[in-house]
Image (tube, rainbow, N blue to C red):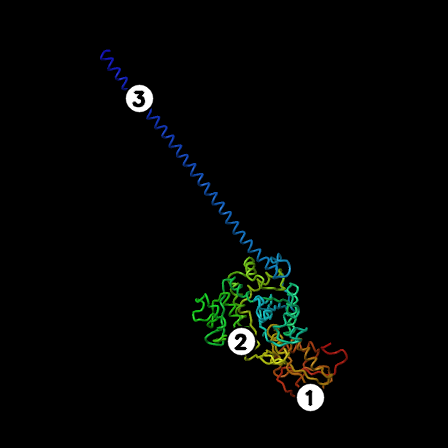
Amino acid sequence: MTSAETKSSRRVDASVPKKSTSKSTVIDDINGSLRAIDEDASKHIKKKKNRRKKRKIVKIISIIFGLMVAGLIGFGLYKAWMAGAKMFQGNLLNIFQQQELKMDEHGRSNVLILGSTDDMAGRDGATLTDSMMVISVDQKKKDAYMFSIPRDLWTKYDRACFTGYEGKINAYYTCASDGDTEEDEAARMNATKELVGGIFGMDIQYVVHVNTVVIRDGVDAVGGVTVNVESDDERGVLDSTFDDMCRGAPGLCPNGHYMQFPNGPNKMNGNQAMAFSQARGMGVPSYGLSGSNFSREKNQQLVLMALKNQATSTGTLTDITKVVSLIDAMGNNLRTNIDAKEIQTIMKLAADTQESDIHRLSFIEEDNMLMTTGSSPDGQSIVRPVAGLYDYSQIRKYLKDNIFATPLSKEGAKIAVLNGGGPAGQAQLEADELTENGFDVVYVGNADEDITASYAIYKLGQEGSLPLTKAELEKILKVGTSGTLPYSIAAEVDYVVVIGPQPEENGIIN
């Protein structure tokens, strides 16, 4: 082989590997790129699958959590629904209606609240209604009056009870029935409502029976209440009877006493409010509860008003779901003859009634002492009317002048009724009838001179004053007002009504 061929062969041989290497590199690059693309696609798909898996897990967890929440809410609503069904009359589905409350002849709805401790098994006197209160509301005027009934008020019963035919009013509740059925409870509530209505001269439409824990659970359900303590002691109130509550909660007893509050606003939880409403100064030391049961009754009213205010401020009384929760909190500790259709009406009325329009009446104020302590016929320590045992006339008049005030009663005219030739006892009969018509008859007696007419009306004092009284007397007696009374009487009055001879079937009593 010539040197030229050898060189040519070498060139060819040298070029082949170079071409082969270049091609391999390109292929490798292409394969590498493809592998990278596959790897990227694989990673993308894997990430996508992971995201889908995570979303699926989150969705499953959300569904499970939602079912748990729905279950808890449903269980809570079921419990509240069952509790409400026990508490109220009628079908609880009617809670979404708004039916007007029943009213008396004055357009007011009157509610008797009875509080006992029969939730405390084995407690002596657990069935006694130691807390008794009447609330009268006007749906149109949006006002309310409340007064407490002393548990030791001695009264005659309308049936034979375990204490006989008379006794303390707090012992009457079990007279109608001592059974455990709903019918027995309804009988007890209705009988007590009728007895109380008869004593105080009121037509009571509703009755609510609560146990001790209702105050505690109701207060806790609205997040606590602020009670404006009004004690007759500058230090506030203290009753060491409840000091056992300090155990395990020293922060609630900074001074060593559980039921200790200064005068003025005090934030209370359920247990504190319950203790405050039960305290009557039985522990040593104690102060600010000198009225004993009377102080306790006053404090119960304060707690009730604080609960109403807190429920209003938190929107509880305007939210049916919150009301259902409040019902559940009360559980089996409340019974009433209120119908489910009336619940929303009561909620709205409570929310719309301002605290300034809620009036607390008392029978033991210094300038209006209508009740006092004393002894029963068998020697027990009791509360009785100042007017005398079983004499509720002054108390009824006080309630009528306040709760059932009319333009006529607000004039405050005092009336004397004299018998001036009428049948024996006619003056008292006419006086009773005038009282029923809203007049304030303060004196009944005999006239110094007889008259020939059936009636005569005389105005004492300034002529033209008390025009409503004048017009109403003339309308009822069908006679005009005469001139000056020709004699004096031993009473300070504004009008004198003289009763003369009565034709058959004549007179305002017929």
Question: Is tag 3's residue or tag 2's residue first in the polypeptide sequence?
Answer: 3
Residue type, numbered disc 2: Ser
Horizontal and vertical percent position of residue 165: 67, 75
Q: Amino acid at mark 1?
A: Asp
Residue to which mark 3 is pinned: 19
Q: Quadrant of the C terminus?
A: bottom right
The reply to whether residue 44 is visible in this rendering is yes
Q: CA distance from mark 2 to mark 1?
A: 50 Å
Calculate the distance from the C-alpha at mark 3 to the C-alpha at mark 2.
Answer: 117 Å
Q: Nearer the viewer, mark 2 or mark 1?
A: 2
Sort mark 1 into few (<14), some (14-19) or many (20+) by Cα contacts within 10 Å: few
Nearest the eye: 194 or 351 = 194
Q: Which mark is residue 187?
A: none
Three-letter code, disc 3: Lys
Q: Is residue 21 above or below residue 333?
A: above
Return the residue at label 1.
448
Secondary structure type for disc 3: helix
Q: Nearer the viewer, residue 487 or 323?
A: 323
**Circle 2 sits on which residue?**
292
**Would residue 306 appear left or right of 384 to someone viewing this image?**
left
